[in-house]
Amino acid sequence: MVSSGARRPGMRGGPWAGLRLAVVLAALAPVAQARAAPAPAGPPLTIHYLERRVERPAPLNNEDPVPDDEGAKGAELGLRDSNATGRFLGLGFALGTAVVEPGDDIRQAFRDLADRRFVVLNAPAADVLALADLPEAKGSVILNIGAPDTRLRDADCRRNLLHVLPSRAMLADALVQFLAFKRWSRILLVTGPAPEDALFAEALRRSARKFGARIVAESRYDPQGGDVRDTALREFALPTRGPEHDVVAVADEAGAFGASLNYNTASPRPLVGTQGLAPAAWGRAVEAWAAVQLQGRFRKLAGRAMRPVDWAGWMAVHAVGEAAVKARSTDPATVRAALTAPGFEIGGFKGRPLSFRAWDGQLRQPVFLLWPGAVTATAPIEGFLHHRTELDTLGLDEPESACRAFSGTSG
């Protein structure tokens, strides 16, 4: 292997040859782009980003708060990437952004959008369903990037909804696959007080049944009324005491106490779940499959690391742009047909082509198992097989889903 600073055999011209070549290429680039990029074939395709601002508790342990622009910056990068690709076919894209404050009417904000045919939605599940059921949304494609609720891919699915963010079922399946592979099959589960915590805990129970793991004991912990940072050494001994177990799983989506469980469990066991070894669509440590390029572009744009909802925002806009490129058109009806076609696939810097499931609109994708600073594993884990694709071992498979809104049953 030749290092980046070494001269390869046969190279001539001394140390300035590379610089001279770079100058020549830079001078020729505008000419090459002008020749390669045809004139725009029509008006740009408009994609709207719509967000419900959610109030979040202050983070513990001086951790970074969830950025106010999480999701929006990902969509912005998706627009830049789509325009960079589309210009060579004469295709252009535009992005509109609307943020709704807590308590405001998101349905009216949706109605006020100038063009509602492609909407990237970053909002809780109740808002997702409220918008999908609007008469004005009948001709829309709503790409959900903020709600992991499994019910949106199950009985509460909608024909006009595509889900870019992994469901809780997918996240839990990724984690329990890893535990089953390691033969750490005995799980002690600690659940927080929030409704979202209960949903993640139920996803873990379902995954344990699915992959042959066992919840040996459960406890509930409510940090309200105290500062867990001062009391963790004593308080966590009781909720983490139970029958013999291999791991302690925590369901604390808001981060109210989960991080403080590390090294404070009654027995010396790994922490997994929403804290500790955590399943996620994306994370700062993801670098394989050229992901470092996406990470670098995002950091240059946003000045921070790319988070899961950022990746979902980028992927949502990127998917619409890629559908337009494959269709060689920005006509909304043509792009929608390409995006929802059974054979549509798209790259997402995850090592394999991604596609939308025909029975519930969920984007098939690998899920990373992340420890701060490292990717421990990527699910689906080796050995978990499926007759269609191993990606369908994560989340609700077609026979498991109660979704009946989609007519397609294959792909």
Image (cartoon, rainbow, N blue to C red):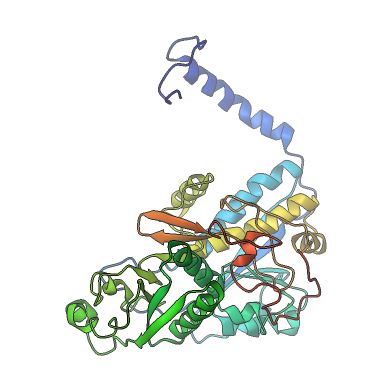
Q: Position of residue 19 (x, y in %)?
A: 47, 20
Q: Residue at x 28, y 74 (%)?
A: 261
Q: Nearer the viewer, residue 46 or 397?
A: 397
Q: Position of residue 296 (x, y in %)?
A: 46, 47
Q: In the image, 42: left or right of 234? A: right
- Does residue 131 lie above or below 69 as drawn? below
Q: Residue at x 49, y 19 (%)?
A: 18
Q: Nearer the viewer, residue 245 or 332?
A: 245
Residue 403 location, quadrant: bottom right
Of all residues shown, which one is farthest toward the bottom?
225
Residue 276 location, quadrant: bottom left
The reply to whether residue 334 is visible in this rendering is yes
Q: Residue at x 38, y 88 (%)?
A: 193
Q: Position of residue 173 (x, y in %)?
A: 53, 70
Residue 302 location, quadrant: bottom left
Q: In the image, 68: left or right of 51? A: left
Question: How many discs mark residues in the rendered view?
Answer: 0
Q: In the image, 55: left or right of 143? A: left
Q: In the image, 202: left or right of 155? A: left
Q: Position of residue 216 (x, y in %)?
A: 39, 82
- Does residue 240 lie above or below 83 as drawn? below
The reply to whether residue 305 is visible in this rendering is no
Q: Quadrant of the C terminus?
A: bottom right
